[in-house]
Image (spheres, rainbow, N blue to C red):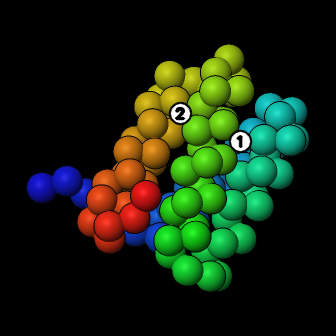
Amino acid sequence: MEERLLANALYQYLLELSEILKNRRAEHLSEAVQFASRFASGSTTELYAESRIILNKVLDEAENLLTVDEKRELKKKISGINSEFERIGGA
């Protein structure tokens, strides 16, 4: 059975990724990820939707800033978001 990506785990990941990007001088991406994390206090659907947009942007723009393992984890989170949307009937 596939492990679910719960909102709290996604929130924690966003905070960690934001810090990684900040430390690698990708401030604009770090701020975007941090912005997405703010949706954790709202609806889960909004958190997943905003996170999916931002994480795909990070994947496209930070290709050379992330390690192989970090990219793998990023792709895993995007896949988890997509799975959660399928479960709840979202976009």
Q: Are marks 2 and 1 in contact (CB under 8 Å)?
A: yes
Mark 2 and mark 1 lie on one chain; the one further toward the N terminus is 1
**Quadrant of the rendering where the N terminus is positioned:** bottom left
Relative vertical location of residue 44 with respect to residue 82 in this rendering, above or below: below
- Residue 11 left/right relative to 39: left
| Residue 8 seen in this snapshot | no
- For the residue labelled by badge 2, is the local secondary structure a helix, a strand or a loop? helix
Please tell me how crowded label 1 is: few (under 14), some (14-19), or many (20+) other residues with Cα within 10 Å.
some
Q: Residue at the location (58% across, 70% down)?
A: 46
Q: Amino acid at mark 1?
A: Ile
Q: Residue at the location (38% across, 51% down)?
A: 82
Relative vertical location of residue 82 with respect to residue 11 in this rendering, above or below: above
The x, y position of residue 4, in whole percent, is 30, 62
Relative vertical location of residue 62 with respect to residue 86 in this rendering, above or below: above
- Residue 85 left/right relative to 70: left
Residue placed under numbered mark 2 in the picture: 70
Q: Nearer the viewer, residue 20 or 41?
A: 41
The x, y position of residue 56, in whole percent, is 58, 38
Residue placed under numbered mark 1 in the picture: 20
Q: Quadrant of residue 3?
A: bottom left
- For the residue labelled by badge 1, is the local secondary structure a helix, a strand or a loop? helix
Q: Residue at the location (60% across, 31% down)?
A: 59
The x, y position of residue 32, in whole percent, is 77, 51
Q: Furthest-top residue in view? A: 64
Please tell me how crowded label 2 is: few (under 14), some (14-19), or many (20+) other residues with Cα within 10 Å.
few
Q: Residue at the location (55% across, 80% down)?
A: 43
- Residue 43 left/right relative to 33: left
CA gap between label 2 and label 1 equals 10 Å
**Quadrant of the rendering where the C terminus is positioned:** bottom left
Q: Amino acid at mark 2?
A: Glu
| Residue 91 seen in this snapshot | yes
The x, y position of residue 58, in whole percent, is 66, 36
